[in-house]
Image: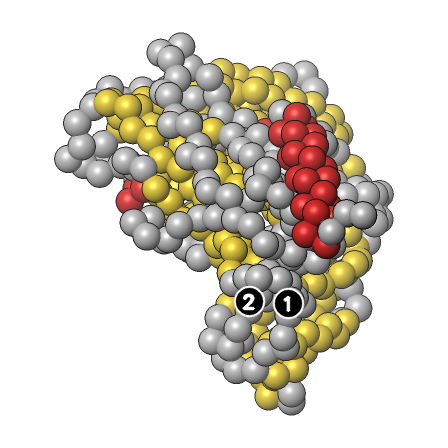
Amino acid sequence: MMGVSARRFARCALLGVVAVAVAASACSDGDSTPAAASPTAAAADAIPTLDYGTPKAPPPTPLPVERGVDDTSDGIGVYPAVVTFPNALRGREYFGTVGIMNGGPRERTYRFEAKGDAASWLAFVAADRTTALAEVTVPAHDKTQVLIRAVVPPEVPNGQYGGTVGVLTSTTTREGSDTSGAGVTLGAEVSVALAVTGTQKIEGQFIDAAASDVESGYPLRIATRLTNTGNVQLNATIDVQILDAAGQPVDHFTSTDQPLYPSDDKQVIAEWDTTGRATGERIGRVSVALGWLPLGTKDVRFNILPPGTYTRRGELADVRLVNKPRAGDYAKLVAVFRNTGQIETKGKFIGELYLGDRLIEQLTSTEQLLLPGGEGDLDLLVRVPEDGAYRVTGKINYEGRETDAHDYTFRVGDKGGRPWLLIGGIAAVAATVVAAGGAAGVWRWRRRGRPAI
């Protein structure tokens, strides 16, 4: 009869074989392609490939194995694997998009840490490109995008520089294990590569222009899609000649307040006031320049229609809290605006934030332009000064009309759910968590010598 020790040995050996198989499966899946993103997200993630070559990023540093962790597992993914800043100028700042995917059943908050030659140059920032992000919260089975900002010091010599940014979260071992209560930091890495040069490069592309029919008295919006493929921040100038159907000039206007950062691929809107204009067919002759560099001219056709031709309608579909703030922090709220009318419409959220019955702050989001049937997120950042139950009361204002007002509540100071683990990576590799055997690939980020962003 097999003794107790022998039986334990056999069970451990079997678990070790299973762990090896699981780890191997996770590794083989590590190169799989993530689900396709929306065209907008794909455009934001893309970084143009330039002729002068691509700087090399340092390979991710393998992180040591941590044993004795909980045997449940969830997932984190980051993309792209490498953020590249080619032909970067000294003293300039550059931005790239990083996607974070939470594959687990609970929302999770991630923090950022950097290492490498360029660690001190790197930071994560919000969409406004100035607000530093110490952490970001991603809902369960969802994803978000943040911007990584690289500020090149003015004194560095030309050359190749690299760094690695960790997108990190923590968990604890389950009770009853030999290491119960010990913390394990898990996450995924994104490599960053910069080629510093002294050569200023001014380049761009005028990809497309479009305009929709408009009712007289409402602004005509001409949408242009532009790309800055150079290495210098420049303003885009949109110059538009309005012609009648026979090609005779009717009006002329210029818009010049749209900055484009290096690698930006964005839509720029130019508006023309149609108040008092006669109905009928028109042509917009759109010329675009990036800084002093002309990018080309395109024609768009549209009609000015009598007032009342189209119906304008909108809905406040939802308001949700997308992070988990502490007292004294900022809460990030998203109001979802849905255009249910027949014509493109601009909308913004307006409202108030209350703590109990006490007014904390008046709320106003930026405006967003939506096509008929479109839905857009209107972001709000509000400070929550103390623990308690908060109430948001608000509505959407769209082109002078308003939706019905609605109330939404959230709490600050509640305890979150128990920590959980991360598996499998997307592009940049993530951690694989296995309870038994030394073959598990759990990563632990060592804090010593790695500056926080």
In the displayed structure image, the side of residue 347 where residue 124 appears, left or right: left
Nearer the observer, 71 or 297: 71
Q: Residue at x 37, y 53 (%)?
A: 447
Q: SS class of the residue under badge 2?
A: loop
Q: Tell me, for residue 181, which label it has, or none.
A: 2
Binning the other alpha carbons within 10 Å of mark 1 as few (below 14), some (14 to 19) or many (20 upward) gives few
User: Circles 2 and 1: CB distance less than 8 Å?
Assistant: yes
In the displayed structure image, the side of residue 89 where residue 320 appears, left or right: right
Disc 1 target residue: 175
Q: How are the residues colored?
A: secondary structure
Q: Amino acid at mark 1?
A: Glu
Q: Quadrant of residue 223?
A: top right
Q: Amino acid at mark 2?
A: Gly
Picture layout, residue 184 above or below residue 195 = below
* 2 or 1: tag closer to the N-terminus: 1
Q: Is residue 265 visible?
A: no
In the rendered image, residue 72, in percent from the top left (x then y), is placed at 71, 53
Nearer the observer, 21 or 201: 21
Q: Residue at x 28, y 44 (%)?
A: 120
Q: Quadrant of residue 355?
A: bottom right
